[in-house]
Image: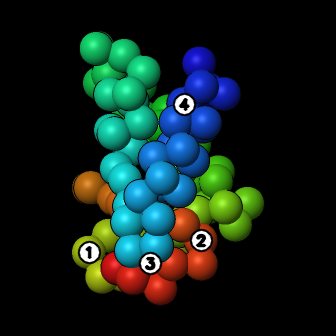
Amino acid sequence: MPDRLRAAILALVFARGEGGSCCPSDAARALADEWRPLLPRARELARELARAGEVRLTQGNRSLDPDGEWAGPIRIRPAGDAHG
């Protein structure tokens, strides 16, 4: 499931293009009707992708450090996207 979840995150982020974003829950919902149990893993995969420079994590108008302490809703954006 982690590979499918990682692929779903990347597909959603890049399908929405520059200025677009997705939430980890969007990727979880794309894979399962019972998506809530997948949400913690989707958030961790988002961190991993951000560490690798593939995506950028934001909360409101600020970029998040993938190794930082944060909670609450986040958005996943293309790494080179200056929006958000």
Q: Nearer the viewer, mark 1 or mark 4?
A: 4
Where does the image place residue 40, in percent across and percent down from the top left?
42, 34
Could you tell me if the residues under marks 1 and 4 are in contact, i.e. CB atoms within 8 Å? no
* Residue at 57% from the left image edge and 47% from the top image edge: 10
Residue on which the image places disc 4: 5
Dot 3 or dot 4, earlier in sequence: 4
**Residue shown at the point (48%, 53%) measured from the top left:** 15
Q: Residue furthest right?
A: 52
- Choose top left, top right, bottom left or bottom right for residue 24: top left
Looking at the rendered structure, the kind of residue marked 3 is: Ser
Sequence order check: which comes first, mark 2 or mark 1? Answer: 1
Secondary element at tag 2: loop
Q: Which mark is residue 63?
A: 3
Q: Earlier in the sequence, mark 4 or mark 2?
A: 4
Q: Quadrant of residue 67?
A: bottom right
Task: Sort mark 1 into few (<14), some (14-19) or many (20+) by Cα contacts within 10 Å.
Answer: few
Q: CA distance from mark 3 to mark 2?
A: 11 Å
The residue carrying mark 1 is 60
The quadrant holding residue 83 is bottom left
Q: What residue does disc 2 label?
A: 79
Give the percent coordinates (x, y) of residue 69: 44, 63
Q: Does residue 69 show up?
A: no
